[in-house]
Every structure is written in C-alpha cells, then in structure tokens.
Image (tube, coloured by chain):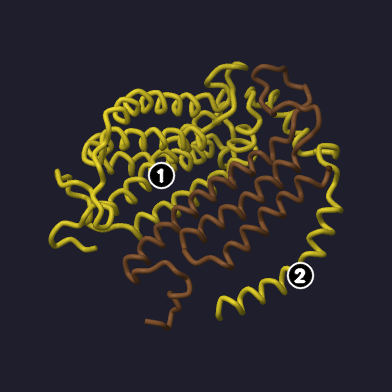
Chain colours: A yellow, B brown
C-alpha cells in the first residue's frame, strides 16, 4: 500500500471513529468529582491490615501481588528477548581500541564529564537503593528504584567509558540480579505455601507502622523486584552498548 | 474544563497514531508508540483524581485523610514498565533490522522486496 493510500484509509477510519470518541469524552464523569470505591477501600483497609503507608506499594505487592509477578515475568521475557536478538560475540572482548559509531570515532570524554559522573553516579546508585528500600513508607518502590539504579549504571559508563564499565559491572552479575530478583519474588510465594496459606499470602509478621520492614511480605517481594529491574536495565544497556563496538576480526556483525 | 484530561488522552493517542501511519523511520515509529501509550497514563491518572485530596501515601499525614485512588496509580506503574520493556525489545529488533537490510524506512522493508 502506498503512503498516500494509507493516509486516505487512516483519514476515513479517523472520521468514522471521531464521533464515537468525542461522545465518550463528553460522557466521561466530571474530573475529580466521582466515587472511587476501590481506591477508598484500599486507603481504608491497607494501613490497618498491612501497616504500610504507601498505598501504591500495598496494591502492587500485596493486594494484587500475583499480577505483579506476571508483570515481573513479562519484564524478564522482554529483556531476555532483547538480549537474544542482540546477542553476538561483538563487544565481548575488552580491548583498548576506541569505540566507533559507524565510521565516526567517538571523541574522548572531557574532564568535566568525568568529574560530574564520578560525583553523581554513586549518589544516584545510593538514592536508587533508598527508593527501593523505602517502598513501604514513601513514594517509590522496586520498579522506580530499580530504574534509578539503572540510570546510575549509565552514569558510570558516561564517566568511565566502555572498558572500565565492563570491568566494574560484569554481565554475569547483571544476569544474577535479573534472574535472582524474579526468582526471589516467585519463591516468596511458595514460601507462603509452606505454611499452608495461599500462594503469595502475606504470612510474615507485619512489623511496626513506619518501620522500613513493615508490611510482612511486601519488603521481600519489593526487594526482589528492585534487584530484577536494576539487573534488567543493566542488561539492556550492556547489550545496546555492545552494538556500538567495532566488530573485531572474525566476529559476526 | 472537566473534559480536558479525557481530551488530552484522546489527543495523545490520536497524534501518536498519526505519527505511526506517516512514519518513515522505525525509531520514530517506536517513539510514536510511546506517545500513544502516554495517552493511557493521562487517562488512568485522571480517572483516579479527586479534588482536594492528597497522595495515597500516609507517611506525613495520618491514614483516613482524603487521598486519590492508589489502584489506578499502581496500574500506571505497570503500564510504564510494560511500555519500557516493549520499547527496549522493539529497539533491539530495529537494530537487527538495520544490520540485515541497511534501512529502517517501513516503505523499503516490504517482505517481498529484496
């Protein structure tokens, strides 16, 4: 189909769908002024029943913890897919040859970038760990904190370069983080079954309100998610970075 | 005014869709997919909004104070994670495609055209 025919077809489809979409927009309830039964139920029940103050974490890792396991496995599947698609011997060897982007050599880093990254990378990694660990208390959690840790890994690369980055962040560690985090989540569910409860039931003592370990099972599965997400971002970053390396002799493209 | 967030969600979805149809580059197309998905974030967060309510995190205000809906916020979190994973997978595929065929223009990549 030519570009022109595709445009005409899309315009016809848009004209057909527009009245329905506009009717839906007009029929939606007024913003911020309609009942929220499920949210109110969570806000009422979860602080008392689970001793956590972050309701989003309570929903994600307790009330619908099984869904989050599915989400975690989906993330694992997508990352494994990306790694398999990009896998090759290219970039595995840590040599001193400069990275190239096509035929264009990448210029060396300036001292200002190195200094800035050396200052911000450790802080970003620690902040990510803080966000992961305080999931039950303040905004954040395993997914958000894992993404921040992933950004910290990017800052390490920006400051130290590819070769140093490969030495500091070995691929096998990232694989262990990703697989171990997802495995911790799944095994925590089986741990609850050992006590005779349902899969992923919250069987651990709930702890005190405001404590970093409050919420029983929530900190455990949240930590698993934090490990898995930071490992996933690191693995993706590693695979994409390997593509920037010039293939050595005999390596596949 | 009360229809504004729903209109924004519809607009984001529509403009991302338009970008996908007219796209001449797969990386641009993947970006358009992310724009379409942003419409769902706006829709979900607006559905859980409530005037005069605080965040559903009771760390600095006691439980029982009015708060917005945490269920849709958890859904948006899932949405963002799925979006990031799908984007990474699609970009990996685009990279391999460029290596095999030397182009990322959808028009040049008909299955039967070699």
Residue A149 in the image: state x and y as whole percent: 42, 33
Q: Quadrant of residue A80?
A: bottom left
Q: Residues within 10 Å of mark 2 (few under 14, many from 20)?
A: few
Task: Pick the residue in front: A203 or B19.
Answer: B19
A51 lies left or right of A85: right
Which residue is at a point 34% across and 29% down the rendered structure image?
A: A117
A5 up-or-down from A167: above or below = below
A183 lies left or right of B99: right
Which residue is at a point 24% across and 63% down the rendered structure image?
A: A253
Which residue is at a point 54% across and 50% down the rendered structure image?
A: B82
Q: Which residue is mark 2?
A: A15
Q: Residues within 10 Å of mark 1 (few under 14, many from 20)?
A: many
B79 lies left or right of B86: right
Q: Is residue A196 visible?
A: yes
Q: Quadrant of residue A113?
A: top left
* C-alpha separation, residue under disc 2 versus residue under disc 1: 42 Å
- Mark nearest the camera among 2 and 1 is 2
Q: Which residue is mark 1?
A: A232
N-term mark: 2 or 1:
2
Q: Chain of mark 1?
A: A
Dot 2 falls on a residue whose secondary structure is: helix
Dot 1 falls on a residue whose secondary structure is: helix
Q: Chain of mark 2?
A: A
The circle drawn on residue B87 is: none
């Amino acid at each position: 189909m030519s570009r022109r025919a595709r445009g005409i077809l899309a315009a016809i489809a848009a004209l057909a769908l527009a009245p329905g979409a506009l009717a839906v927009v007009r029929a939606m309830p007024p913003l911020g002024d309609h009942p929220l039964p499920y949210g109110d139920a969570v806000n009422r029940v979860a602080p008392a029943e689970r001793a956590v103050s972050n309701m989003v974490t309570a929903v994600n890792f307790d009330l619908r913890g099984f869904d989050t396991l599915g989400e975690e496995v989906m993330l694992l599947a997508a990352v494994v897919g990306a790694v398999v698609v990009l896998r090759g011997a290219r970039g595995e060897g840590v040599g001193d040859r400069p990275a190239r982007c096509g035929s264009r050599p990448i210029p060396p880093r300036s001292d200002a970038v190195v200094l800035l990254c050396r200052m911000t990378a450790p802080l970003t990694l620690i902040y990510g760990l803080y966000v992961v660990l305080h999931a039950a208390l303040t905004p954040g959690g395993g997914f958000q904190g894992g993404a921040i840790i992933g950004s910290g890994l990017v800052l390490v690369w920006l400051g130290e370069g590819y070769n140093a980055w490969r030495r500091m962040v070995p691929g096998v560690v990232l694989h262990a983080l990703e697989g171990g985090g997802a495995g911790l989540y799944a095994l925590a569910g089986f741990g609850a079954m050992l006590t005779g409860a349902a899969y992923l039931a919250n069987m651990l003592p709930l702890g005190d309100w405001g404590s970093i370990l409050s919420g029983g099972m929530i900190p455990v599965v949240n930590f698993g998610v934090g490990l898995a997400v930071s490992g996933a971002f690191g693995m993706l970053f590693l695979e994409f970075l390997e593509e920037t390396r010039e293939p050595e002799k005999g390596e596949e493209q | 005014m009360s229809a504004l967030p729903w209109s924004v969600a519809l607009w984001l979805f529509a403009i991302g869709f338009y970008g996908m149809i007219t796209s001449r580059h797969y990386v641009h197309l993947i970006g358009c997919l992310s724009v379409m998905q942003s419409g769902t974030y706006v829709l979900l967060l607006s559905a859980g909004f409530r005037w005069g309510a605080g965040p559903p995190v009771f760390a600095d205000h006691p439980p029982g104070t009015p708060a917005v809906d945490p269920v849709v916020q958890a859904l948006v979190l899932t949405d963002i994670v799925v979006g990031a994973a799908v984007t990474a997978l699609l970009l990996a595929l685009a990279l391999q495609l460029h290596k095999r065929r030397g182009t990322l223009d959808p028009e040049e990549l008909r299955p039967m055209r070699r």
